[in-house]
Amino acid sequence: MARKGSGAAHQWLLDHAAHKSDECLFWPFSQGDGYGQFSHLGKTYRAHRYMCKLAHGEPPTPRHQAAHSCGRGDEGCFNQKHLSWKTNGENQRDRRRHGTKNTGGWLAGAKISPEQDVRIKELAKTKTQMEIAKLFGVSRSTIQYRLYGGSYKPRRERLIVSV
């Protein structure tokens, strides 16, 4: 893989904007949840949104989201055939349909038992929050919530409060 800052991520998007296959095309630069980011000419972009612009033009409004019809956006799919501009409501209905709806927040407590909380804290010593989330079938934010005592506050604030 090309070195960081070489423009490889931007070039990859340009090279794959006319990808012909209907199969998912995965972002090779992902470092976490699959929703990659990259910088180009001093500006940071969400890669799936940038690919949607390349393939389908500007969004109808700034509030439109680059939605994945395949349901594999969280795994890093960037096939332009699977991307389209949708409102938040349309995107959330799609997420429910493919089973990728965020399970964080108050619903997370119903999915994680006290025994699982103990296991999550043990796994956190050696695994990322994304890896743990996949093991339990919940979102990364759910794991973060469980690890830090029910707080979504920024890490610095959590550390100050917990001292």
Image: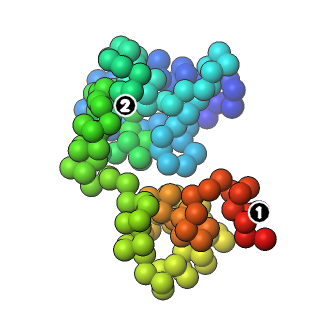
Residue 3, image x and y in percent?
Answer: 69, 31
**Disc nearer the start of the sequence (1/2):** 2
Identity, as a three-letter code, of the amino acid under mark 2: Gln
Label 2 CA crowd tier, 10 Å (few <14, some 14–19, many 20+): many
Which of the pair 14/140 is nearer the observer? 140
Instruction: Report helix, strand or loop for mark 2.
Output: strand
Residue 120, relative to residue 92: is it above or below? below
65 displayed left or right of 42? left
Q: How many numbered discs sit on the rendered protein?
A: 2
Task: Report the residue at 54% width, 20% height from top.
Answer: 11
Identity, as a three-letter code, of the amino acid under mark 1: Ile
101 displayed left or right of 14? left
Which of the pair 102/74 is nearer the observer? 102
Instruction: Report helix, strand or loop for mark 1.
Output: helix
Which of the pair 51/143 is nearer the observer? 143
Residue 160's tag is 1
Residue 65's tag is 2
Image quadrant assignment for residue 61: top left
Task: Report the residue at 38% width, 42% height from top.
Answer: 73
Residue found at the far front of this picture: 161
